[in-house]
Amino acid sequence: MNEERLYAFEKMLSDILAQYDLVIEKLAVLKAEGKEKTVTYRQLFTNKQQYQTILSYYRTYGLLDNDKE
């Protein structure tokens, strides 16, 4: 694998982890406000599940430590 491709994989992983963390924070705020039934909350929850799925693939292939998520 060339360096550009490796960099792209690392960048993708970094971006997914950052987005996952951001979604978790937003969900916590909405939950604290009692807005679990809003469309925004439900969309963010779906995004969280998608990020978890992607991260599980990284983990399955040994590209992510088990302690990250």
Image (spheres, rainbow, N blue to C red):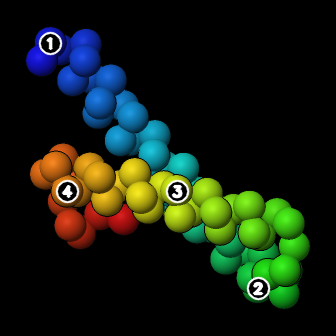
**Amino acid type assigned to the residue bearing label 2 in the image:** Ala
Amino acid type assigned to the residue bearing label 4 in the image: Thr
CB under 8 Å between discs 2 and 3: no
With 49 as the anchor, is 4 left or right in this view? left
Q: Secondary structure at mark 2?
A: helix
Q: Is residue 32 left or right of residue 2?
A: right
* Element on which disc 3 rests: helix
Residue at numbered disc 3: 50
Residue 9 horizontal/vertical position (percent): 29, 30
Distance CA(mark 1)–CA(mark 4): 22 Å
Q: Residue at x 33, y 23 (%)?
A: 8
Estimate the x, y position of residue 51 in percent, counting from the top left: 48, 55
Which residue is drawn at the image coordinates 20% and 67% (left, top)? 66
Marks 4/3: CA–CA distance: 15 Å
Distance of label 2 from label 3 (alpha carbons) = 23 Å
The residues bearing labels 1 and 2 have C-alpha atoms spaced at a distance of 46 Å
Q: Quadrant of the C terminus?
A: bottom left
Dot 1 falls on a residue whose secondary structure is: loop
Label 4: state its secondary structure.
helix
Instruction: Name which residue type carries label 1.
Output: Asn
Circle nearer the viewer, 2 or 4: 4
Q: Which residue is mark 4?
A: 60
In the picture of the structure, the residue carrying the numbered disc 2 is 32
Closer to the chain start, of discs 4 and 3, is: 3
Residue under circle 1? 2
Q: Is residue 41 above or below residue 20?
A: below
Label 2 Cα neighbours within 10 Å, binned few <14 / some 14-19 / many ≥20: few
Q: Residues within 10 Å of mark 4 (few under 14, many from 20)?
A: few
Q: Can you give x and y, in whole percent of width and height, for residue 25 in the image?
A: 62, 67
Residue type marked 3: Gln
